[in-house]
Amino acid sequence: MKVGYIRVSTTDQNPARQEEALKAHGVERVFEEHVSGKDMNRPKLKELIDFVREGDVVIVESYSRLARSTRDLLSIIDKFQEKIVSFVSLKENIDTTTPQGKLMLTIFAGLSQFERECTLQRQAEGIAIAKAAGKYKGRKPIEKPADWDYVIQLYKSKEITAAQAQKRLGLSHATFYRMLANCSAKV
């Protein structure tokens, strides 16, 4: 089955151009949404991923409609590939049923990995320079809340649960247990 995905960022934008492109390619089912593509948390995109089955082809007018970043695009296409679903982007002429389309995705994946590694390298270099200059001390530790001892006493006596203690203290799960471990280690 040919399945289409249409996305426009706002309700004011007109999806007609995308609709015509997909119609011309014989798309049988369309998932359309009017939301930003800044992340992959989109209801119709999730529906599309759940809907497609082995042998289906997902067609978009442009891959920018499916994802804004190379990393998101590759993640979505990985989900398609897990389900043995092909992907076609009309504007960029990418078709994963062809060797050329697979090559393009391999190049995208390589560029994305290269970009990520360069970013991490620049970050590490910047931190090293800042540390050498005495300007980088790392993230400041989170201070224990004023009522820490009282709430921990309630928790240890099983009067409240860990979740209740975290809520009272305003701490995340990880921070709560890290602080708890540090207190136990000092005793």
Image (cartoon, rainbow, N blue to C red):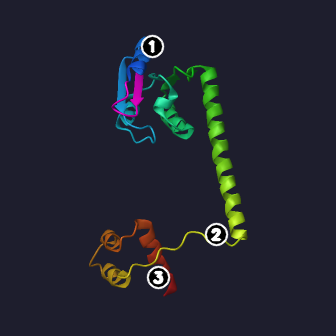
Secondary structure under the numbered disc 2 in the rendered image: loop
Residue type at the position of mark 1: His
Q: Which residue is mark 1?
A: 25
The residue range painted magenta reads 1-14
Question: Does the residue at mark 2 contact the one at mark 3 (Cβ under 8 Å)?
Answer: no
Q: Nearer the viewer, residue 125 or 4?
A: 125
Quadrant placement of the N terminus = top left
Secondary structure under the numbered disc 3 in the rendered image: helix
Q: Is residue 24 above or below residue 62?
A: above
Residue type at the position of mark 3: Cys
Residue 163 point in image, percent of width and height: 32, 68
Q: Is residue 85 above or below residue 74?
A: above
Of the numbered discs 1 and 2, the one sitting upstream in the chain is 1
Give the number of the disc on residue 123. Answer: none
Along the horizontal axis of the image, is 8 left or right of 186? Answer: left
- Residue at the outermost bottom position: 187
Q: Which residue is mark 3?
A: 183
* Location of residue 114 (image quadrant): top right
Q: Which residue is mark 2?
A: 136
Marks 3 and 1 sit apart, C-alpha to C-alpha, by 64 Å
Q: Nearer the viewer, mark 3 or mark 1?
A: 1
Q: At 41% from the left edge and 23% from the top edge, which residue is drawn?
A: 4
Q: Nearer the viewer, mark 1 or mark 2?
A: 2
Of the numbered discs 2 and 3, the one sitting upstream in the chain is 2
Q: Nearer the viewer, mark 2 or mark 3?
A: 2
Residue 177 point in image, percent of width and height: 44, 72
- For label 1, the crowd category at 10 Å Cα-Cα, with few meaning under 14, some 14 to 19 and many 20 or more, is few
Is 48 in the magenta?
no
Along the horizontal axis of the image, is 23 left or right of 102? Answer: left
Marks 1 and 2 sit apart, C-alpha to C-alpha, by 56 Å
* Location of residue 150 (image quadrant): bottom left
Q: At 33% from the left edge and 32% from the top edge, which residue is drawn?
A: 11
